[in-house]
């Protein structure tokens, strides 16, 4: 049997050790850097359905494109600002606390590991749904590198490159430099302004590896990034009763959030946007990570230190339309729009992790560790409701808010090999987390309102100064892990596990129904089977069931922003299958299937009390029982399948790869699930890649067709001022890519 008829061995670090994927008793998927480049995965937003149970979205703005695994991750864009995500993201072993990373370009990546299910003991805070681990390419002992350039029919251009090799003659210092840049013209048409869904991204990274002696290694990685994204959203609800100077339409300014607008499907398929206010996010990010490793006999000490900061600023046309309302009587000034907002966010974080672990050679192996994390967040958000306030002159609500977080944790994990084929593992993690929250809110008049008489509301006049909030939380948690790992036969391994997860409580930056929310807890039970049926065929099966208590969900605040509320009990359960096969020389297949069933078992959430309301008013809200409803972004079915064939053409090698993804319909709101306006339809995408490369892989030319059937769908629907707005997936495109390696 030739090498190209055997499945490539995959090494992962899902348990903080280097292990074969097939030896890890965790449901997980791995995407290599080559696979990411070949399939056009440019950001985390492109990963949808490539790992079973993983649901991604396009950003509605401010870098908020939350990830969801097995129905846990929520909708509404992550716009609570300070809320912790249930899918933890790590880069080179360091925790990334904020969502900002999901919209940035991936570059010079070695692999991405997607861990499904709570990882409360080994990874800790905010991994109640799972973890996404990004491993960048490491420095090499030999001089090597690459340059990759691409251009697509959507007028997007990307350039990436890296060079790596020794810095000294004794190979004790290795260096890798990598950089990436992109210009994206966007897609769709905007009848009221500039084209949307484009932007630019520039990032650079330097990695140093010091290995002065055997068993001693220090990796230093510094990264800077600058980006601008211009996402577009489409108004979904019926706004036909709203007056508009552009069209001459007159109405009562009454809107119907749960009734779709006329012609919505045609607008979606054509990608017709109508934003008449600037919509963009500008992001600056810096990161420095130090990872040290010291071998102490049969034990290894690992230290990971990270500092990261972000500065984000942006604006958003949050009504999704180009409606220009006429000026109300006695209002002095231009209305121009229904609603928009602007924000400046600043985040900084520092983390330190220490781990001491034995090797895996004996019957008894162990790992102990400690984790320290601190973060400071600051935000100023101005929400303009341009028909609200006295006389309909408009109001601007300004939130100035900050939060400081400190988290301490200690953990251990033990494994005892009961027999040569049977192992039992158990672990505990103790966490103490403190948060201090400050928040102020003022509401001011935008345009002057000067009716007959003595009453005048001047432009900029303060209308409301809400009481300042100064609150703190201090909570502790003990997470558990228990795993039975059994080699049933040669090439067949089964496992059964119990994991508990914890996500600390926090505060609502936009106040909402309650400015504070409780911590989230879950218990997860999982059984799995990993099989190497033959050297050319692997099949993995996993079944799971989660039980959540105080599940944190995002709910829209009708006057602007997003809040967090909790559900008393919720459940998620399902079945996943993954297959990898190389049946013939040059022919390979990858496939996965995910079946998911979610249910809210008990809970109430705030929802709009009426099916319609007048623009400029505060829509009345009531508490509704959502027991029996489904969780958001929880498709019943996900399917992924790809096949590739590679063959020699003289001194060259050709390849053809066909891939298809399908995802069932999803809800984007835990309430009002009978409404079609907060529901995303089922979708499918088909990609085709044709490539020609040198047999030694020195160069490659590739043509990639993405979403060949031009399937259009809303990947995210979020509420602005109580009205649904949707972000679209990327339409059909053709991309030409050139790569040179040395």
Image: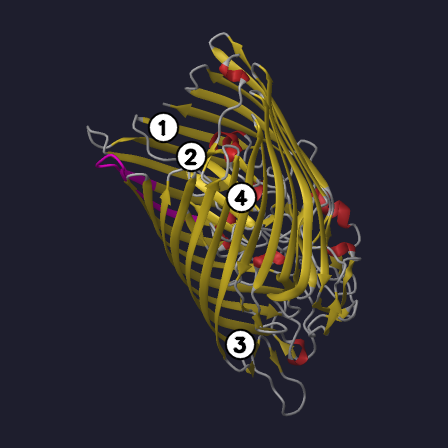
Cα distance in 3D space between marks 1 and 3: 52 Å
Q: Residue furthest bottom?
A: 454
Q: Residue at x 46, y 30 (%)?
A: 149
Q: Residue furthest left?
A: 169
Task: Indicate the position of residue 239 as horizontal and vertical percent values.
Answer: 75, 61
Q: Which residue is mark 1?
A: 145
- Disc 3 crowd, CA 10 A, few/some/many (<14, 14-19, 20+): many
Please, what secondary structure does the residue beneath circle 2 have? Answer: strand
Which comes sooner in the sequence, label 3 or label 2?
2
Which comes sooner in the sequence, label 2 or label 1?
1
Q: How many marks?
A: 4
Cα distance in 3D space between marks 3 and 4: 34 Å
Q: Between residue 103 and residue 480, name the one nearer to us.
A: 480
Q: Which residue is mark 2?
A: 160
Q: Is residue 338 visible?
A: no
Q: Between residue 359 and residue 469, name the one nearer to us.
A: 359
Which comes sooner in the sequence, label 1 or label 3?
1
Task: Indicate the position of residue 452 as horizontal and vertical percent values.
Answer: 68, 88
Q: Residue furthest front?
A: 419
Magenta region, residue range: 206-226
Q: Which residue is mark 3?
A: 441
Please, what secondary structure does the residue beneath circle 4 have? Answer: helix
- Disc 4 crowd, CA 10 A, few/some/many (<14, 14-19, 20+): many
The quarter of the picture where the C terminus appears is top left
């Amino acid at each position: 049997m030739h090498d190209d008829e055997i499945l490539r061995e995959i090494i992962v670090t899902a348990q903080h050790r280097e292990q074969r994927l097939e030896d890890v008793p965790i449901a997980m998927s791995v995407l290599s850097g080559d696979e990411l480049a070949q399939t056009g995965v440019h950001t985390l937003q492109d990963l949808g359905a490539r790992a079973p149970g993983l649901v991604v979205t396009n950003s509605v703005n401010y870098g908020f494109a939350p990830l969801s695994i097995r129905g846990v991750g929520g909708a509404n864009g992550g716009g609570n600002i300070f809320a912790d995500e249930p899918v933890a993201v790590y880069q080179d072993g360091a925790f990334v606390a904020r969502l900002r990373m999901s919209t940035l370009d991936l570059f010079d990546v070695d692999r991405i590991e997607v861990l499904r299910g709570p990882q409360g003991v080994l990874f800790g805070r905010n991994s109640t749904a799972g973890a996404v681990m990004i491993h960048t390419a490491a420095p090499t002992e030999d001089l090597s590198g690459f340059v990759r350039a691409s251009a697509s029919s959507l007028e997007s251009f990307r350039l990436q490159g890296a060079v790596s090799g020794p810095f000294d003659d004794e190979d004790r210092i290795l260096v890798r430099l990598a950089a990436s840049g992109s210009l994206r013209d966007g897609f769709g048409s905007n009848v009221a302004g500039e084209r949307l869904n484009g932007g630019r991204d520039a990032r650079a990274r330097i990695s140093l590896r010091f290995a002065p002696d055997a068993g001693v290694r220090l990796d230093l990685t510094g990264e800077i990034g600058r980006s601008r994204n211009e996402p577009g959203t489409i108004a979904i609800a019926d706004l036909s009763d709203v007056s508009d100077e552009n069209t001459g339409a007159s109405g009562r300014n009454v809107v119907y959030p749960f009734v779709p607008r006329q012609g919505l499907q045609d607008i979606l398929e054509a990608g017709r946007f109508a934003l008449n206010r600037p919509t963009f996010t500008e992001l600056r990010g810096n990161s420095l990570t130090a990872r040290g490793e010291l071998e102490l006999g049969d034990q290894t000490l690992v230290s990971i230190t990270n500092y990261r900061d972000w500065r984000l600023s942006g604006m958003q046309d949050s009504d999704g339309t180009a409606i220009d309302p006429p000026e109300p009587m006695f209002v002095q000034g231009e209305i121009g729009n229904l609603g928009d907002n602007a924000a400046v966010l600043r985040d900084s974080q520092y983390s330190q992790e220490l781990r001491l672990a034995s090797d895996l050679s004996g019957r008894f192996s162990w790992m102990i560790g400690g984790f320290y994390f601190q973060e400071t967040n600051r935000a100023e958000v101005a929400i303009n409701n341009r028909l609200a306030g006295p006389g309909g002159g408009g109001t601007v609500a300004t939130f100035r808010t900050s939060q400081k977080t400190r988290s301490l944790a200690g953990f251990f994990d033990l494994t005892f090999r009961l027999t040569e084929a049977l192992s039992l593992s158990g672990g505990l993690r103790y966490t103490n987390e403190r948060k201090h929250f400050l928040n102020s809110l003022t509401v001011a008049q935008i345009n002057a309102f000067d009716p007959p008489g003595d009453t005048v509301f001047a432009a900029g006049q303060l209308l409301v100064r809400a009481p300042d909030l100064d609150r703190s939380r201090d909570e502790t948690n003990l997470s558990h892990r228990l795993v039975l790992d059994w080699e049933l036969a040669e090439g067949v391994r089964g496992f059964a596990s119990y994991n508990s997860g914890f996500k600390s409580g926090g505060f609502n930056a936009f106040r909402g129904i309650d400015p504070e929310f409780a911590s989230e807890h879950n218990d997860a039970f999982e059984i799995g089977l990993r099989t190497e049926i033959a050297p050319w065929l692997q099949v993995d099966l996993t079944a799971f069931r989660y039980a959540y208590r105080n599940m944190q969900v995002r709910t829209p605040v009708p006057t602007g922003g997003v809040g967090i509320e909790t559900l008393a009990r919720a459940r998620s359960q399902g079945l996943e299958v993954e297959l990898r096969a190389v049946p013939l020389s040059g022919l390979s297949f990858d496939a996965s299937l995910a079946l998911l069933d979610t249910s809210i078992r008990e809970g109430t959430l705030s929802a709009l009390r009426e099916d319609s309301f007048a623009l400029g008013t505060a829509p009345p809200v009531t508490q509704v029982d959502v027991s029996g409803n489904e969780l958001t972004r929880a498709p019943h079915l996900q399917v992924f399948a790809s096949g590739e064939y590679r063959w020699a053409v003289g001194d060259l090698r050709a390849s053809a790869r066909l891939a298809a993804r399908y995802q069932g319909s999803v809800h984007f709101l835990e309430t009002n699930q009978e409404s079609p306006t907060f529901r995303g339809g089922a979708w499918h995408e088909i990609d085709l890649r044709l490539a020609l490369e040198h047999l030694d892989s020195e160069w490659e030319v590739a043509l990639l067709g993405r979403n060949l059937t031009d399937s259009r769908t809303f990947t995210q629907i979020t509420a602005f001022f109580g009205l649904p707005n949707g972000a679209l997936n990327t339409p059909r495109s053709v991309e030409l890519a050139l790569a040179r390696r040395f």
